[in-house]
Amino acid sequence: MTEKMQVKLNVNGEDREFLAEPRELLIYALREHLNITGPHVGCDTSHCGACTVTLNGKSVKSCTMFVAQANGAEVTTIEGLGNPATLHVLQENFREHHGLQCGFCTPGMITRASKLLEENPDPTEEEVRFGMAGNICRCTGYQNIVKSILAAANEMNSAKEAAE
Amino acid sequence: MNDMTPERDERAANLKGLGCSRKRVEDARFTQGKGNYVDDIKLPGMLHGDFVRSPYAHARVISVNKDAAMALPGVLAVLTAEDLSPLGLHWMPTLAGDKQMVLADGKVLFQGQEVAFVVAEDRYIAADAVELIEVEYEELPVLTDPFEALKSDVVLREDLAGQTEGAHGPRKHHNHIFTWEQGDEAATNQVMDNAEVVVTESMYYHRTHPCPLETCGSVASMDAVNGKLTLYGTFQAPHAIRTVVSLISGIEEHNIRVVSPDIGGGFGNKVGAYAGYVCSVVASIVTGRPVKWVEDRMENLMTTAFARDYWMTGKISATKEGKITGLHCQVTADHGGFDACADPTKFPAGFMNICTGSYDIPVAYLAVDGVYTNKAPGGVSYRCSFRVTEAVYFIERMIEVLAIELDMDAADLRRINFIKKEQFPYQSALGWEYDSGDYHRAWDKVMEAVDYEGLRKEQAERVEAFKRGETRTLMGIGLCHFTEIVGAGPVKNCDILGLGMFDSCEIRIHPTGSAIARLGTISQGQGHATTFAQILATEIGLPADSITIEEGDTDTAPYGLGTYGSRSTPVAGAATAMAGRKIRAKAQMIAAYLLEVHDNDVEFDVDRFVVKGAPERFKTMKEIAFASYNQAIPGLEPGLEAVSYYDPPNMTYPFGAYVCVMDIDVDTGVPEIRRFYALDDCGTRINPMIIEGQIHGGLTEAFAVALGQEIAYDKQGNVKNGTLMDFFLPTAWEVPNYETDHTVTPSPHHPIGAKGVGESPHVGGVPCFSNAVHDAFRPFGLKQTNMPHDHWRIWETANKLGLHD
């Protein structure tokens, strides 16, 4: 065991402080210290993306970052994207277009998709497929995930146009 | 009363019953990160377990030194076989009638085998302690080839030394497990000897792994005060796990509660019992605290149940015109170090005897030899029903090689050999009774949809252009017509560990007209909470939105054999409909009483019972539900509940016709799927949206298996694909879009005519992708090359055919 350090994170808009070993991975800090269990561990090797969070504005695989590296960061997880009263457009569209089955990849998938649509609000199908290639789903074959993301992009763009 | 009026249509639509693309009720929690998977379970005082695993594939374990690990602060226990043996838990029974070491008992038989189990305050300390345990091994010769294993003097299973009789009959050699024969060998040989055309071909269906995104795990909590064990885990068959835990631990079954929480995909990987489950239970008993074990991805790929690994040699005979006259199939099945296949007891090679496929083959013979090697145990049905994927791959390749031999179009060859619609129920040469089908209709629909003739013309032009040096890509047209056999199964011939493979549903209607139904199955992404409510909505006339479906808690759910082999809809779905009908029968009596007429004078109408001939006089199911709780009805007990344990009279036989159009770059070996057309007939369709999702997913797993996914071993028994770096899981970038279509041929024996669909696309998809690769090279003389067709192997095929010269 190594000596524990004081870690500060802003998670989903809330400041959190806790003691953790520096070698602890961010995913375990979130899941086990903060009880934020939306992000999952699927592979430990940063291939599957089930642990995806947004960290300081970037999509990050939280299984491949030490909590010490994340100290002081702003982190958004699936829990911070929407709430039962007001779902994120992506959450609604994943349900509408059957973009999930077992649900294990879904938090990482939607978190990544939310960042993708910030980076590229009007993507082509090809751009969605490329932009989501870091997130593996074993159930859906991706077709409906892609459909969900494109539909969400459309809806967000229509809402933006209507507001302008 | 059966005329559909707009008013009636509206009432039916409000139910969201059969045939409705109802949105999933599961999605609210999954899209908000509120799923509850095994690793999300956190109990007060919970400890973490981790394994010391063997780096060797075959070795004696000379000693295990725990001292340094035990000295590490935070380590509570280190268990070895020696610690488990007084409890009789150092070995456990497998689902295939064999036994398997829980922790290495003197030797190890595959790389990654469990040697010791560390229990510590957190997962980091447990991992540190694993590093501190010193195990002394003595290496033994390694056998990774089943043919070599059958000749070798090296005895893998010393515990079975001298046993010439196994769970499935005589053993021919110390590394032999069983021989399973079906059909008539003499008659088949006679047909072959006298046939106009006979083709022989050998193929290897490589070893792979189901690899659900969530790995396997469990949390055991022994309550010493009350003597109750609670076991949460990734169980596709929670009730069977409860019975097994009771049998091997001696804890009475009523004192064990097994819970399958949300499961992050199964695909067969979570059917069996693993050492981790047993060790978490023992560790909880030993420490008096809850113990969690969750494997990592490498452990999952290297040690939990693999799939396939079948060496298949076929012989098919036909007339010169292409009418098939006989089929012979010989399989050598590599089962690894222990026989831990998950098959019904009487079927040690699963339903491999569906290998006559969709064709009317008068005589056939199948023999399967199971063999021990130094590889991980398993042999589960990875998104298929008990070796059906192997069977369909075999016959769909044999058809293709026969077409080459006859110089015939493979689509025509299939067409002239299909079992005809009027032949159902059809008795196959290898013992099955196919319940229903209309293969010609499905096939013709697909051929027309893809413009098959046009594709062949284009392909021929491409070959000419290639020969002229104008293009470096070839075009392959992959065909497949598959017949599945799912819904295991009738108790008369299907059991696992002696437990009949029926399934169950228990329904309670609440006073205000909503309901809860509990089933013996467990969803792993299939959307049972959505679809089973739809079956019930149509059966009992209450909205699906008012029906809660609950599965996976053995304290509350009725006994059932779980979810795998596409059995949930055929078996538990049938139980659901039958229990619903019991509810309806009682509701009819209540309605008649309330309407003051004879029972036979009312009839069911969507969501109500109406007086025959007087539709204005009715009682809705909601009113009837309330009446059942507040009226004293002579001759009837209060309440409205029902339970059904359904023993299916037969399996169901979904089928489908698939076409894949592929362009292959002969210089890079990269295949590009241009089009994939999938027609599935799963009988009555419960939720078209979910069916389509299942088909997309199954096809993508087929894409993976056919085009790159494998678990390979080197000669020392090292796993070469133990991480997602090496084990191919396709991403959104690689996979194509699929076109889906359907016909509907209801199962005649299923209460609602449904057949199951989740595995069809995988079963049919693998040969379709593989046939496309083969077909591209057919004009250049390719007859057979083994999967997975990754870029390197495709390039190599092109190279061997001289296409790079």
Image (cartoon, coloured by chain):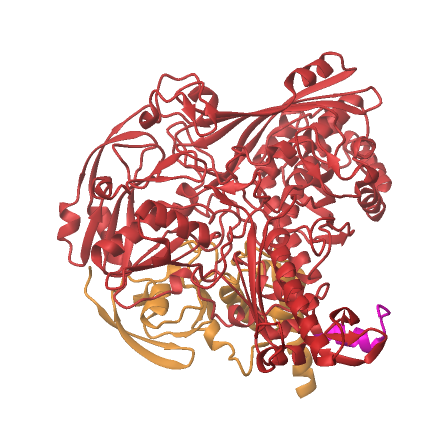
Chain colours: A orange, B red
Magenta-colored segment: predominant secondary structure: helix
Which x, y percent locates residue A157?
Answer: 66, 77
Up/down of B612 relative to B456, above or below: below
Residue extending farthest to the bottom is A163
Residue A48, above or below B507: above
Q: Residue B289's image quarter?
A: bottom left
**Residue B724 appears at what percent x and percent y?**
46, 48
- Number of disc labels: 0
Residue B269 location, x and y as percent?
48, 47
Closer to us: A13 or B233: B233
Q: Which residues make up the magenta segment?
A: B1-14
Q: Quadrant of residue B622?
A: bottom right
For the question of whether residue B89 can be seen, the reply is: yes
Given residues A124 and B155, the one toward you in this image is B155
**B109 or A136: nearer the eye?**
B109
**Left or right for B647, reference B498:** right
Taking B397 as reference, is B78 above or below it?
below
Occupied quadrant, residue A25: bottom left
Residue A109 lies left or right of residue A125; in this view the side is left
Front position in the image: B756 or B731:
B756
Q: Residue at x 29, y 77 (%)?
A: A17
Residue B126 visible in the shown view: no
Q: Looking at the image, which residue is at 81% across and 31% down?
A: B464
B390 vs A53, left or right, is right
Residue B212 position in % (x across, y down): 49, 52
- Verify whether residue B4 appears in magenta: yes
